[in-house]
Amino acid sequence: MINLVVGAGFSGATIARKLAEDMNEKVIIIDAKAHIAGNAYDYRDRNGIMIHQYGSHIFHTNLENVWQFIRRFTDFNTYMHKVIAVIDGIETTIPFNFRTLYDVFPETMAKRMEEKLLAHFEYNKKVPILEFQKQDDDDLKFLANYVYEKVFLHYTTKQWGVSPNEVDGAVTARVPVYLSCDPRYFQDKYQGIPSEGYAQTVKNMLDHPNIELRLNTKFSDFKGTYDRLFYTGPIDEFFDYKYGELPYRSVNFKLEELDIPYYQSNAVVNYPCNYDFTRIHEYKYYLNDQSDRTVIAKEYSEAFKRGKNDRYYPIPNENNAALYQKYLDEAKYLSNTYFLGRLGDYKYYDMDKAINRALELFEQIKGE
């Protein structure tokens, strides 16, 4: 049995490893890019700093099976991600929480709001911003409108290119008010950065005698035969855009190398209301890389245009879901062909969810 896997990101690498190792089948894995690891690709630059080429990637999960799987191929540091935002010129914690409350408001005002929040909501609860706005109390209304404008409105408009009202609830739910003093961006049990990077992790996953890797190889240019196909590329491209193009948001990262030890106080600093970029990444924080110089990346959101930039975020709404369903229905007529990953499923995946999706698909294949 020969398997062809299109895409050498985490989805493709996971299914390839399982097929090769657990079923002792041959796997050819191809990628149109010149590197493995997809958008998680990283590399050390001339300063010894590990650069995340496609923006910051932080591994975090509560899924024991995923953690046990990925730990076979890498060690992780104990990095716990925190995000700083500049709100009214003040650096403070995001998501908006009790620490943020006291950073941006006078103490007496912050204390009054804290007491009302605890009277209305459970401690340690995450409340989506649009739900949080449905309050009768004047102080909480004020707070909800403040957070909506200062944290959510302008950032969301920059990131998605539309007003928040036009963005799917699954996206808005990811920008909560967090009724806690926990400054971490993620609360997952397992968090960290691979000690030798994501690219090395994927390289280790693909290090098996049954796996053959071919880079700089498009699916349309592939020459050879195979019995099963696992496609992690864009599902609309696979069908030659028969029903139309699935829209995405893209991102442009502008790297700057600076002759100073550090540029900012944190790995990621968001700028919700200022400038035309959404945030600045400073990569040396992730693995505590030591250098007299630093590298930052300013992140600009933009519309995806074929041939110009890369697909990053599927745009979830009813029209796009209906269009994706047409391609999914078309895929049902294909035998031994499976779509997965962010582009194949037209769904945003954190890295752990992408791995889990591939593990679940493998179990399905094994049972057939």
Image (cartoon, rainbow, N blue to C red):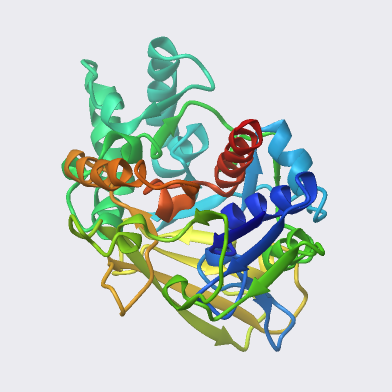
Q: Nearer the viewer, residue 152 or 357?
A: 357
In percent of width and height, residue 95 lies at: 46, 41
Answer with left or right where residue 217 lies relative to residue 241.
right
Quarter occupied by the C terminus: top right
Locate the N terminus and report the quarter of the image it occupies.
bottom right
The quarter of the picture where residue 48 lies is bottom right
Q: Where does residue 102 sit, x and y in percent of width and height?
A: 47, 37
x and y percent of residue 59 in the render?
Answer: 64, 50
Query: As drawn, which residue projects farthest toward the top?
Result: 119
Q: Residue at x 41, y 28 (%)?
A: 108
Asked whether the viewer can see residue 320, the reply is yes
Say which residue appears at 52% left-offset and 37% top-offset.
99
| Of the pair 100 and 174, the residue shown nearer to us | 174
Horizontal placement of 15 versus 112: left or right? right
Seen at 73% across and 53% down, the residue is: 25
Q: For this rendering, which residue is in front, 82 or 353?
A: 353
Q: Is residue 99 above or below residue 27?
A: above
Q: Is residue 235 above or below residue 126?
A: below
Asked if one can make out residue 266 in the rendered structure from this viewpoint, the answer is no
Q: Nearer the viewer, residue 320 or 67?
A: 320
Left or right for 214, reference 243: right
Q: How many marks?
A: 0
Q: Looking at the picture, how far across and down is residue 80, in whole percent? A: 67, 47
Q: Residue at x 28, y 67 (%)?
A: 304
40 sits to left or right of 316: right
